[in-house]
Amino acid sequence: MSLQIPRPIDPSLHPLVTGNYRIATPAIEAFYELVIRCLRYRIMGALIYGPSRIGKTRAIEYVRLLLAQNHPKMTSYHAQCEHKPRHAEGPFFANLLEAVGDPDPNAGTNPSKRMRLSLRIREAAARAGSGTVLLFCDEAQRYNENEYEWLRDVHDALDRQQIKLFTFLVGQQELLAQKTGLQIAAETQIVARLMVEELSFHGIRNAGDVATCLNGYDQTAYPEASEWSFTRFYIPQAFDAGYRLVSDADTLWRTFEAAHHKASLPGRLEIPMIRIVNYVSDKSLV
C-alpha cells in the first residue's frame, strides 16, 4: 500500500488490519431480516442452519452489531455451545452463565446456576431499559433434548419476570433433523418455543452475491462518517479515478468457478465469506 497520500489514521489501526469489522452477505442480510421478523411478530425461537465453515459465526457477530446500532435498548448474547461427552445440567448452565458475563460461571449448585442466570439477564435488561433479550446459540446441533428442555425452562423463568427471551439456534444441517425428530416424538413444546422459524444459511453463490460483499467495502467508511471508504483507504488514487471493488465481482466469481472446476470439486460452488476477505486483503496490498 502506497503511503504517499496521507491517511486519516495509522494504517495499522484500520479494521481491515485488526479484523474488527463485518461486511454483509445476502445470507447475513436474510439472517438479520429473520431476527427482526421474529421480534415484530413475537416468534420466540428460530433455526438458522447451514454447512460448517460457511460464515455462520461471523453472521451472528454482524447481526449483533447491527442490533446494537439499530435497537440499542435490546440485550443480546452469543453462547458457544460446547461439545460434551456427557450432557449434564451443570455444564449447560455454566456455559450460558459464561455467555452472559457471570464472573464465576462454574460456581454453585445447579439450582443456584439457574437462578443466577435469570438474575444476570434481568440485571442486563434493566440496565438497557428493555425487557427484550436475544440469545444466539452457536453450534446448537450439539444440544440434546434435555438441553432444549432446560433452555425452555429459562424462557419460562424469564417470562414470569416480564422478560421476553428470543432464542436463535445456529448450527449445521443436523438442526433441521433434530426439529423433525422432536416433531415425530410429539415434543411440540420445544418446537413451538425454540424452533418455529427456519432459515437455510449459505455462502456466496453467484456474481451478484460477490457484488453485494464487495460493495460493502466500497461503501463502508473508517473513520465513520469520513470520506475514507475501505477501498479508498488502500487504493486512494484508483478510487478517486473511479475504480470500485464491486467492478471486479464478475471476474472474481469466474476465477473461483475456474478453480472449482479445475479441482473437480463436487457440488455447487459456494464461497465462504473468509475467502472474499482474503481477496480484499490481497487487493489492498497491490
Image (cartoon, rainbow, N blue to C red):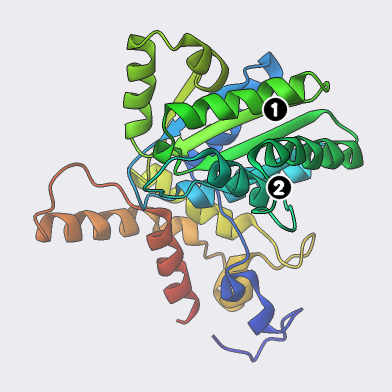
Q: CA distance from mark 2 to mark 1?
A: 13 Å
Residue found at x 60% / y 30%: 167
Residue 95 in picture, x, y percent from top left: 58, 48
Is residue 140 among what the camera can see?
yes
**To which residue does mark 1 refer?**
165
**From the viewer's perspective, is residue 163 above or below residue 271?**
above
Residue 180 in picture, x, y percent from top left: 34, 17
Q: Secondary structure at mark 2?
A: loop
Residue type indicated by callout 2: Val
Residue 100, label in figure = 2
Q: Secondary structure at mark 1?
A: strand
**From the viewer's perspective, is residue 21 above or below residue 189?**
below
Residue furthest to the front: 109
Residue 179 in picture, x, y percent from top left: 39, 21
Residue found at x 63% / y 74%: 233
97 or 20: nearer the viewer:
97
Residue furthest to the bottom: 4
**From the viewer's perspective, is residue 10 above or below residue 267?**
below
Q: Splitting the image into 4 quarters, where does residue 227 fall?
A: bottom right
User: Could you tell whether 245 is left or right of 239 in the image?
Assistant: left
Residue type indicated by callout 1: Leu
Residue 259 in picture, x, y percent from top left: 19, 61
The quarter in which the N terminus is drawn is bottom right
Residue 57, label in figure = none
The quarter in which the C terminus is drawn is bottom left
